Amino acid sequence: QLQLVESGGGLVQPGGSLRLSCSASGVTLDYYAIGWFRHAPGRVREGASCISSGDGDGLTSYAEFVKGRFTISRDNAKNMLYLQMNSLKPEGKAVYYCADRSNYCSAINHFASWGQGTPDTVSS
């Protein structure tokens, strides 16, 4: 089971940007599909974006609520995965998690290991 660690969250004004990072030690993240998930208070955890493994051609997908604003990417040299979040909306607090599964992206309940999450707040 992977031990994923998220970082990069914080307080940002509406319209601003954040870059979240997902890392894991002892494993090569490119071997896994990695998803980013958002969990806001009072709401169910929902998928924001996902990238398939290198063997899965690194295919990316985005939820409608982030399309055109968020970009998921890998830096295999650093064994890191990122979620660049631009044009953030004033949605208050949320926690973002990264999670893994084999090769291809799938529904949220198919992801195996989850990090502890990184909180962000978008508010003026």
Image (tube, helix red, strand yellow):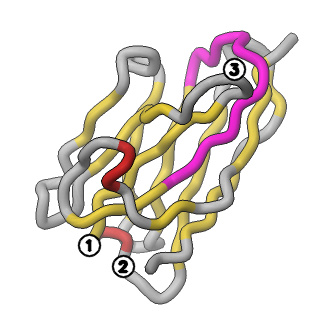
Mark nearer the viewer, 2 or 3: 2
Q: Does the magenta stretch include residue 93?
A: yes
Q: Magenta stretch?
A: 86-98
Q: How far apart are marks 1 and 3 (CA)?
A: 32 Å
Residue assigned mark 3: 16
Q: How far apart are marks 2 and 3 (CA)?
A: 31 Å
Residue drawn at 70 percent across, 23 percent down: 42
Which of the pair 28/4 is nearer the observer? Answer: 4
Q: How far apart are marks 2 and 1 (CA)?
A: 6 Å
Q: What element carries label 2?
A: loop
Contact, mark 2 vs mark 1 (Cβ under 8 Å) = yes
Which of the pair 115/30 is nearer the observer? Answer: 115
Which of the pair 73/31 is nearer the observer? Answer: 31
Residue 100 position by quadrant: bottom left
Q: Where is residue 91 in the image (x, y as percent from the top left)?
A: 70, 14
Residue drawn at 40 percent across, 42 percent down: 72
Residue assigned mark 1: 31
Q: Where is residue 74 in the image (x, y as percent from the top left)?
A: 38, 56
Residue 28 is labelled as 2
In the figure, is residue 33 to the left or right of 71?
Answer: left
Q: Is mark 1 on a helix, strand or loop?
A: helix
